[in-house]
Image (cartoon, helix red, strand yellow):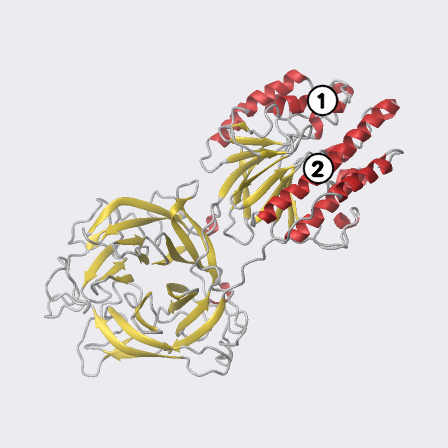
Amino acid sequence: MTTRHLPALLALAAAALAAAPAAHAAAPNSPAASLVGRAILPADATAPAPFPGVVNTDPAPAPGATQPVGGFSALIDAGKKSTYWAMPDNGFGSKANSRSFLLRLYKVNADFKTKAGGKGGGVKILDTITLRDPNHKIPFAIVNGATKDRLLTGGDFDIESVRQVKNGDFWFGEEFGPFLVHTDATGKVLDAPIPTPDVKSPDYPADYPAPVAGPANLNSSSGFEGMALSQDGSKLYPTLEGAVTGDDPQVRRMYEFDLKQKAYTSVRRSYRVGTPGDAATNGYSVSDLVSLDATHLLALERDNNQGVTAAWKRAFVVDLGQANADGTLAKRQTLDLLNVADKDGISAGTQRPGDVGLGDPFSFPYQTVEAILPVSGDRVAVVNDTNFGSTGRNPSLPDYSDFIQVRVPDLHAPVLSNQTYAIIGDTPYGAAQLANFPNDIKTINADPDVARVMHVGDIKDGSSRCDTSYFQQIRSAFDAFADPLVYTPGDNEWTDCHRANNGGYQPDERLSTVRSIFFNQPGHTMGADKAVAHQTAPYVENVLWKDASTVFGTVNVPGSNNDLVPWFDAAETDAQRQAQLQEYAGRLVADMRWVDQIFDVAEQNHAKAVVVGIQADMWDPAAIAADQVSGFKPFVAKLAERARRFHLPVLLINGDSHLYETDFPLADPDATNSKIYGIKSKVTNLQRLTVQGSTNQPHEWLKLRIDPNTPTVFSWQNMPFGG
């Protein structure tokens, strides 16, 4: 909507903005991981043994016998370049069918192919260590219990992880107990297997005292797939692959074991797999765990899919000294094994008909990716478990053992803290919601994840009075939030208060009242007191703060065409219209400067993302149809300019239109959303989120998770209000 005085006022606004200081460019995204070496051990590889390893058989000594070697669940350094101790698990998948499969470590050398056309690409077996119990340290029955050497097999233990300590001894994590198994450097068992406190699997030996009475509380194949050794060599961190009965299904227990005392300590940490709140990731496994430095671990996570259906084969840096709000360890993704650059063509020339995941990008689509090892600088070595029949690389062929080295540029970057917010708007609406508002507040207060609340405007419906006493009632309710509350005003509490059923107030006077009641202490939140930066008076409602490597800002941009819809319709006087235009022009300059300030702070602090909260839905179809978007055009142009220059994720949160929606409103310059605002260049990093509000059902609040360790930073879910 245009008016007779608006062009001149906008010209003044443009002149004022032109004097604003220039911003600096944001830091670029971290480069992707890249393949730097690859070597293959054939699927039919074997090694000499006293008896053959054959599925569903008992040991039967025979001259010239061999054991299958393929597939590894652990990888540790063997002292020389590209030389490792590689450990298979129990063999063929179960206690019953693996009785003839020897438990071993194989010393292997990977002759990595490092560029297209380069030499190498094979793996040699250099030595073998076979686990044995000649001194009868294991007090329960084992497969070869009647023999002199008492060689251990997959019918005795399912070893899945291993670490070697300073004196050369090995410590194995396994899954039948789950137990810790201690051997010397030759594989001889030194102690009785050590059970896990309060945990028992279905495969626990019936003739050995269990740590918990009654039925098993851990599924089969859910034991110590991952086990890190602390950098100082004093402790192990054995971590369960699956969840214990009664635990959060996404949470895995991480124990601490004192090697000197040979006992578990009282410390127990929690590790969350997958994506928080996404039940589809509940079954993901912690498949390996290794130390990076004194306070950080490197964890592998995997789904159970393979080939083209594989979706989650990822590595995360874990901070032992930093916990999320729910008590789980903070982590950040550092490697996606399904998307690795291969610019040098290292995987080229090895394709067989039907192979998947070779070329650029390179993929590691194996069902069980269970071994990762930092090798030097920013490089890691990874190998798969073949399961003697998995078909991840080729649906028609058994998998080979695929040894790779990957450069991970941000391997040693810090783990950034994450945060969870509650977002509400257009509430309370009407007498019923007002009466129940204390219960809504209690619902949010009861969520231990929530650290801050944002209300994006409209604290009343559009047909009720804008009386000061009502504002004071809502302010009192806001102070009942247990967490800091940030609020930006909506049109219902000031721009629309001219309506007769709202009390016939002059809107700029109501805005002054809103400021005096809700922003009487500029720079302080409501609810729990927390400091925020604020704009100078009178625009103290515009605030910003930093959290979780993200810069957040609220800007007073209300609906009703950003306060350009005439206050009193045909009855409006010239003085009232002039007051409205002066209010709009002054606030527009302040708002646009505040957008600059938000992004300036983000760029100066190398923020990973920006959140902007306003009340207006600037793409509300009803407003567009009524041609009530002119008041938003300068703001949209400024937001588009700064978001485009920032490059990283920008989340615009608004209320106003009352129905939950999310989109990328300026991603397509040819779409109506861009054309109505004259945006001619796409802005692909700006995502809009409209919160559910008013009396629409379901009555919900939005739980926003901010995790700067993820590429998209933001994830959310709508949560029902209780009461």
* Residue 572 appears in the rendering: no
Q: Secondary structure at mark 1?
A: helix
Q: CA distance from mark 2 to mark 1?
A: 19 Å
- Residue 467 percent coordinates (x, y): 68, 17
Residue 507, compared with residue 388, is above or below; it is above
Q: Can you identify the residue that label 1 sits on?
A: 510
* Residue 235 appears in the rendering: yes
Is there CB contact under 8 Å for labels 2 and 1? no
Q: Quarter of the image holding residue 502?
A: top right
Residue 681, compared with residue 108, is above or below; it is above
Q: Quarter of the image holding residue 193?
A: bottom left
Amino acid type, mark 1:
Arg
Which mark, by number, is residue 208?
none
Quadrant where the N terminus lies? top right
> Residue 572 or 532: which is nearer the viewer?
532
Q: Nearer the viewer, mark 2 or mark 1?
A: 2
- Residue 61 percent coordinates (x, y): 17, 77
Q: Secondary structure at mark 2?
A: helix
Residue at 20% of width from left, 60% of height from top? 182
Marks 2 and 1, the one that precedes in the sequence = 1
Which mark, by number, is residue 591?
2
306 displayed left or right of 504: left
Amino acid type, mark 2:
Asp
- Residue 206 percent coordinates (x, y): 18, 53
- Residue 534 percent coordinates (x, y): 62, 33
214 displayed left or right of 687: left
Residue at 34% of width from left, 46% of height from top? 269
